[in-house]
Amino acid sequence: MFITGKIERSILHLDLDTFFVSVERLKNGRLIGKPVIIGGMSDRGVVSSCSYEARKYGVSSAMPMKLARNMCPDAIIIRGDMELYSNYSNIVTDIIAERSPLYEKASVDEHYIDLTGMDRFYGCYKWSHELRQYIIKETGLPISIGLSVNKTVSKIATGEAKPNGEREVQKEVVLPFLDPLSIIKIPMIGTRTYHILRSMGIATICTLRSIPAEMLEKLMGKNGIEIWKKANGIDSTPVFSYSEQKSISTEHTFDKDTTDMTRLNQLLVSMVEKIAFELRKQEKLTSCITVKIRYSNFDTHTLQKRIPYTSFDHVLAEAAKELFSRLYQRRMLIRLIGVRFSHMVRGVQQLDIFDDTPEKVNLYLAMDRLRKRFGRDAVRRASGVMTINEREERALKQLENVPLRRCAVAP
């Protein structure tokens, strides 16, 4: 359909319902209909995911596990298996990739598809419905979809379609659809922003969009303008192709070829820290790590490993060191080492979500704040940094290898 010279956009949002719980129910049908909580098993852990039955008791994601147990004492607690969840996520992505003109994997359980222009040939809603049915048939997983004119409205529509439903919001009904909803439904609004707006008496999207944009900008800066736009159903954000950024990597070439295993492992940890921080800044996760070495004779070898989605270096560093130990077999001098993260998706890291503790979360948040303020090297892991003694020993070795020069004596 053509409007004012432009093609009206059609954006589909897909969200796997209570994804981790749904996968566990595929393994164990006795969990169906019962309150289920996925997360750390100790009281110091946090909730990663929970079933709708558990939510009725007030349980929610990121809640301390001790509190969740008290709120829902009959819940079945499962530590979870991120590798299994990642595999199911990839199965769904493969189905979407085979059938979609342009798609974006927004997280392990969310996708966007740009269907703009398809109405002229087939029908966007019919195509979306058939895709959803096919995913359910092939995987057995419940999935909800929302179809509308942009990413914001389609995501909100998906939320209203849950559980395991479909919702289409056409252009002419976008504002009537949004107006009665709570402001918490807007994707950008988190807990802190929600409480600020509620303290101003703003509860519904209708009230929020009636506030002058300038007022919200004074209150929240640029984010205020973005929130106002979303409340008015305005969002020009494109669907980013899944292959837009396939990987992020770093390499180091030695001034002098080496077999110093201590230094090589220190450098690997340091390189992982560097690009893991970049992942977190971009709010992305990786599910594949590759280590590369180049010997002094220029022979180059790589080894990769699929891992559960993560962006934290305490997980990635161990994987990198494991790959390096498997890869380095020839005991020759090494000229170069490199690390690459690939199979990236957008998403917020949940650490090792089943052994997570509030202290570990706060530690990472604090380290990243320091890096953003004072530079990437403001905080570094001890395992990735040489000690003073190691530096002195290294300097002495370098001096020992420097040939003595004879001084010219004047006659």
Image (spheres, grey):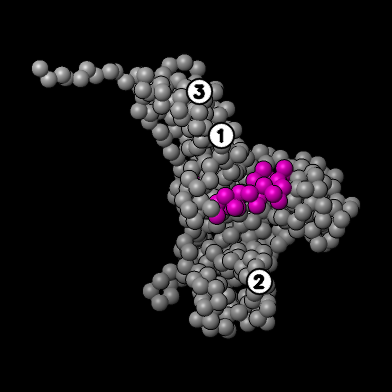
- At label 3, counting other C-alpha atoms closer than 10 Å, the crowd grade (few under 14, some 14-19, many 20 or more) is few
Residue linked to disc 1 = 383
Residue 262 coordinates in the image, percent (x, y): 52, 25
Q: Position of residue 133 (x, y in %)?
A: 66, 53
Mark 3 or mark 2, which is nearer the start of the sequence? 2
Q: Quadrant of the C terminus?
A: top left
In three-dimensional space, the C-alpha distance between marks 2 and 1, rounded to whole angstroms, equals 41 Å
- Which residue is rendered at x = 47% and y = 15% of the image? 330
Tell me the residue that label 2 is attached to: 194
Q: What residue appears at the point 73 percent right and 60 percent down from the top-left corner?
A: 163
Q: Which stretch is magenta?
A: 344-369
Q: Point out which mark residue 93 bears.
A: none
| Rendered image quadrant of residue 202 | bottom right
Q: Earlier in the sequence, mark 2 or mark 1?
A: 2
Residue neighbourhood size for the residue with mark 2, other residues' Cα within 10 Å, grouped as few (<14), some (14–19), many (≥20): some
Q: What is the secondary structure assignment of the residue under circle 3?
A: helix
The residue that disc 3 covers is 261
Q: Say which residue appears at 59% left-offset and 52% top-offset.
A: 366
Q: CA distance from mark 1 to mark 3?
A: 13 Å
Amino acid type of disc 2? Tyr
